Amino acid sequence: MTDVLTPKQRSANMAAITGKNTKPEMVVRRATHRLGYRYVLHNKYLPGSPDLVFPARRKIVFVHGCFWHMHKCRYGQVVPATNADFWSTKRKGNVSRDIRNVAALRNLGWSVLIVWECQIKEIGVLTKRIVKFLERPSRSMKQRR
């Protein structure tokens, strides 16, 4: 199937996609804030510049887009019809970078939760998952006791 947009329009669309303050991230941020948790946004001093950082708890939440980070859901398994090699390389690079960043964060004593874009649709399940993650003692907390 050919693209319905001109190359210039497609380029403008792709350039407009950002890595911060995305709709899924905003849903997670609002839900977390509503639960009473406070966080730091996009800490550039930590590997991967995490979306939400809870310093006192040593916890981090990443909000990943299913397509961009190749989630195993139907949205993450979409294969672009045009420029497939480029997108395959790009997306695989995102996944390998994610793995490196999560490993580095865990080595630094942080606990990491990844929330996928497809998971924000069920807000009740999402909030329970966030509370469970944030209330569970982290590895660094256990070591201090």
Image (cartoon, rainbow, N blue to C red):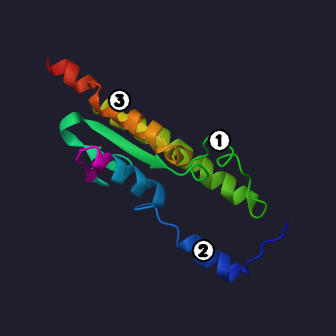
Give residue 123's position: percent from left, percent from top: 46, 44
Question: Regarding mark 1 in the picture, which secondary structure is present there?
Answer: loop
Q: Which residue is drawn at 59% across and 70% down?
A: 14
In the image, 3 versus 93, the foreground residue is: 3
Give residue 68's position: percent from left, percent from top: 58, 53
Which residue matches tag 3? 132
Q: Is residue 112 left or right of residue 10?
A: left
Q: Which residue is drawn at 48% across and 38% down?
A: 99
Inspect this view and state whether residue 88 appears. yes
Query: Which of pointers 1 and 2 indicates the residue nearer the eye?
Result: 1
Q: Is residue 80 magenta?
A: no
Cα gap from disc 2 to disc 3, whole angstroms = 37 Å
Question: Regarding mark 2 in the picture, which secondary structure is present there?
Answer: helix
Using the rendered view, name the quadrant where residue 81 is placed: bottom right
Which residue matches tag 2? 13
The amino acid sitting under disc 2 is Asn
Which residue matches tag 1? 73
Q: Magenta segment range? A: 32-40
Query: Which of pointers 2 and 3 indicates the residue nearer the eye?
Result: 3
Lower sequence index among marks 3 and 1: 1
Q: Residue at x 28, y 50 (%)?
A: 33
Number of numbered discs visible in the structure rendering: 3
Question: Regarding mark 3 in the picture, which secondary structure is present there?
Answer: helix
The amino acid sitting under disc 3 is Lys
Lower sequence index among marks 1 and 2: 2
- The quadrant in which the N terminus is found is bottom right
Q: Which mark is residue 27?
A: none
Q: Is residue 27 left or right of residue 3?
A: left
In the image, 41 versus 24, the foreground residue is: 24
